[in-house]
Amino acid sequence: MKNFFRNVLYNAFTIYLISQILPGVKVYGGIPTLIFGGLALTLLLAVLKPVLNILAIPFNLVTLGLFSFVVNIIIFYLLTVLVVGITISAFNFPGYEYVGFIIPKIYVNTLFSFLLVSFLQSAIVNFIDWLTRS
């Protein structure tokens, strides 16, 4: 039970961080929406993701595991459907330049927004878990 509540808080915090990092992710409703979104994401990851991974085994074998990103995209799409206050949409990346290193302006469509969100959520949760591991 302690792990479940910890995962809810981790997921709520990652939703907040991602909404601060990516302009295409919006959270309306404040802390109650974040907590409910963390709860919904934890339940989706605990219940639905294993089922989808089992159904996607043939595709994962053919694509050498890259289809697992599609499973994560489905999970985050269902999160936006279930939690009304969380939206993920397309956005324009304004570009970045630092000491000769240039990333040009990029239009990120909705599919790649979901892909970025799933990648960032996984990376942030793994980093927080690594930090808090005893």
Image (spheres, rainbow, N blue to C red):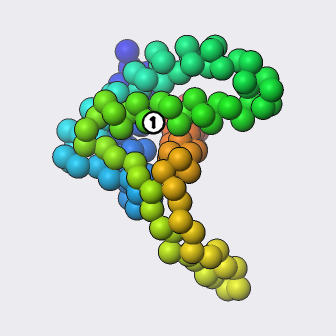
Residue plotted at (43% across, 23% down): 44
Residue 26 seen in the current view? yes
Quadrant location, the C terminus = top right
Residue plotted at (70% across, 85% down): 100
Residue 127 percent coordinates (x, y): 56, 43
Toward the bottom, the furthest residue is 99
Helix, strand or loop at mark 1 = helix
Please give the residue where the numbered disc 1 appears in the rendered image.
Answer: 76
Residue plotted at (50% across, 31% down): 74
Q: Quadrant of residue 40?
A: top left
Residue plotted at (40% across, 48% down): 88
Q: Looking at the picture, tell me which residue is in the foreground, 98 or 86.
A: 86
Quadrant location, the N terminus = top left
Residue 75 percent coordinates (x, y): 48, 30
Q: Residues within 10 Å of mark 1 (few under 14, many from 20)?
A: many
Residue 129 seen in the current view? no
Q: Looking at the picture, tell me which residue is in the foreground, 27 or 70.
A: 70
